[in-house]
Amino acid sequence: MAVVTPSSVLPFDDEYAPLYSVGQVASMLELQQAFLRRLDEFDVVRPRRTDGGQRRYSRVEVGRVQYVVGLTREGMTLAAIRRVLELEQQVKALEGQVETGRRRIRELESRVRSRRASVPPM
């Protein structure tokens, strides 16, 4: 019997594992397979490919497809959706930079306070 360790992650435990075919995703989300192929062609959702060239979607990508479907139902074009997704990624990156800057400021403020505390009063 195999021993399961915390480091032994099964593919279905990994939300980024490319597990689902176009047909499976289309069936799960009640979409046409052609729509999924168009999302790939327009660089909106780019699933990974098998060595044989078949598209394979991860759970994260299936969620992204659901998000995109909602945007298309609101009347957005695929080009507009691609731009929205790009801008969302940029915002996320900028938020990370802001948080890094805030941490750095806290570190510097802490150093200043500790140096002020070590300087004898005049």
Image (cartoon, rainbow, N blue to C red):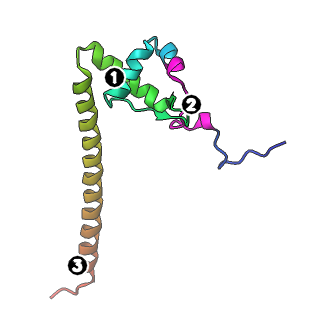
Name the residue that disc number 3 marks: 116
In the rendered view, tell whether residue 103 sits above or below residue 71: below
Q: Do the residues under discs 3 and 2 have CB atoms within 8 angstroms?
A: no
Residue farthest right in this picture? 1
Name the residue that disc number 1 marks: 68
What secondary structure is marked by label 1? helix
**Toward which corner of the image does residue 120 lie, by quadrant?**
bottom left
Q: Amino acid at mark 3?
A: Arg
Q: Residue at x 25, y 43 (%)?
A: 90
Q: Residue at x 24, y 68 (%)?
A: 109
Q: Which residues are magenta?
A: 11-25
**In the displayed structure, does residue 80 sit left or right of residue 67?**
left
Name the residue that disc number 2 marks: 19
**In the displayed structure, does residue 23 sit left or right of residue 107?**
right
Q: Do the residues under discs 3 and 1 have CB atoms within 8 angstroms?
A: no
Residue 5 point in image, percent of width and height? 71, 48
- Mark 3 vs 1, N-terminal side: 1
What secondary structure is marked by label 2? loop
Q: CA distance from mark 2 to mark 1?
A: 20 Å
Label 3: how many residues lie within 10 Å, few (<14), some (14-19) or many (20+)?
few
Residue 84 point in image, percent of width and height? 24, 31
In the rendered view, tell whether residue 72 sits above or below residue 55: above
Q: Quadrant of the N terminus?
A: top right
Q: Residue at x 25, y 14 (%)?
A: 74
What secondary structure is marked by label 3? helix
**Toward which corner of the image does residue 39 lie, by quadrant?**
top left
Q: In terms of depth relative to the viewer, which is nearer, 113 or 10?
A: 10
Q: In terms of depth relative to the viewer, which is nearer, 3 or 108?
A: 3
**Toward which corner of the image does residue 77 lie, by quadrant?**
top left
Residue 61 point in image, percent of width and height? 44, 30
Residue farthest left in this picture? 122
Label 1: how many residues lie within 10 Å, few (<14), some (14-19) or many (20+)?
many
